[in-house]
Amino acid sequence: MLNKMGIIGGGMIGGVLLQEIPRRRLARRVGLVDIMPPDLAKGKCLDIAEGSPVMRFDTELSGSKSYEVLEGAELVINTAGVPRKPKPDGTLPTREELLQTNLKITAAVAAGLREYCPDAIVISIANPLDAIVYRLQQLLEPEPGRLFGMAGVLDSARYRWFVAQAAGVSVENVEALVLGGHGDTMVPIRSACRICGLPVEQFVDEETLAAIEDRTRKAGGEVVKLLGTGSAFVSPAWSALEMAEAVIHDKKKILPVSARLSGEYGVEGLFIGVPALLGRGGVERVFEIPLTDAERAGLERSIAAVRKTCAEVDALV
Ligand code: APR
């Protein structure tokens, strides 16, 4: 158990994190910062604290509009961002406008982290994932492995669930990896997909697998359309917590992580979804795995897309 965890952004994902951290006994204290007036962070903390006798936990929850509430946090999960929603004039912001807004938020996030918990391990979920984590790296310059992004655990969980449904087996029997950037170019790695240790092709036919991989790439959008407002929030929170637990319990668990590469996969200095070992030091090791030619080509395309987004970040800041 940690002494203190921090959450930045107390919206839909932050709200689930705030419930789950005490339930899973991950930290004695949790600090939540959100700038939303009148005081969303304080309100969310009060709601959950008032239910704590029923749920039987003594975790101290503090919410605030000020980043001071993160003081001393050892691990922080960042969810601060704005979604793509119509502007007051009714038009939708362009991708660039949205990126610009989220980069401003990221500047505030980095300033808060630097001031109040400069040594914390940071897991970032905020979108556009690849751009935000890249910018955080520039602003924070953390020790290697202490900043990384959550996307692959969720994308892989979606792939695993679709495969389990198609094969008619428990989700617990399905292992899978989705690598690359977090977006349309992500690469479901069929050659690493196993059901009870056996190649997935022994259970699911080629056509169905291709459809599953396509659905995986678009899975975020599918939920957005059904919800009508906002995006998936429970599964992203659980996915970030799987990573947090690997760190807190020093599990040495290999998960798909948006990790900063230093030459692996031919990439220098970008955050790309790759299999990585998570332990008390954060990302302790990155694995280069064998890929088929098609998977390798897909990963190259995805890396190119991330490189392009990061170049947009460099141009905007
Ligand atoms: N500091 C702290 N919190 C902020 C800041 C800031 N500078 N700017 C915005 N926030 C808060 C908002 O007030 C909001 O409560 O971040 C919260 C984001 O919550 P939601 O809008 O509900 O978004 P959520 O669904 O939780 O997703 C968060 O994760 O998956 C990504 O695309 C998603 O980028 C989004 C992020």
Image (tube, rainbow, N blue to C red):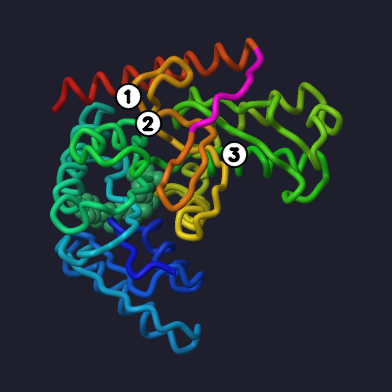
Left/right of residue 16 with respect to residue 94 in the rendered view: right
> Which circle marks residue 156 in the picture?
3
Q: Residue at x 25, y 52 (%)?
A: 119
The answer to whether residue 291 is magenta is yes
| Quarter assignment of residue 168 | top right
* Secondary structure at numbered mark 1: strand
205 up-or-down from 89: above or below: above
Label whose residue precedes the other's in the sequence (3 or 2): 3
Disc 1 target residue: 269
- What is the residue that sits farthest to the bottom in this orientation? 53
Number of marks in picture? 3
Q: Assess disc 1: are there few (<14), some (14-19) or many (≥20) residues with their C-alpha within 10 Å of its C-alpha.
A: some
| Residue furthest right in the image | 202
Which of disc 2 and disc 1 is earlier in sequence?
Answer: 2
Write down the region rendered in magenta: 286-292
**Residue 176 location in percent, x, y?**
66, 36
Identify which amino acid the numbered label 3 is placed on: Ser
- Residue 32 image-quadrant placement: bottom left
Specify the amino acid type for callout 2: Arg
Label 2 belongs to which residue? 260
Residue 23: horizontal and vertical position, in percent? 49, 73
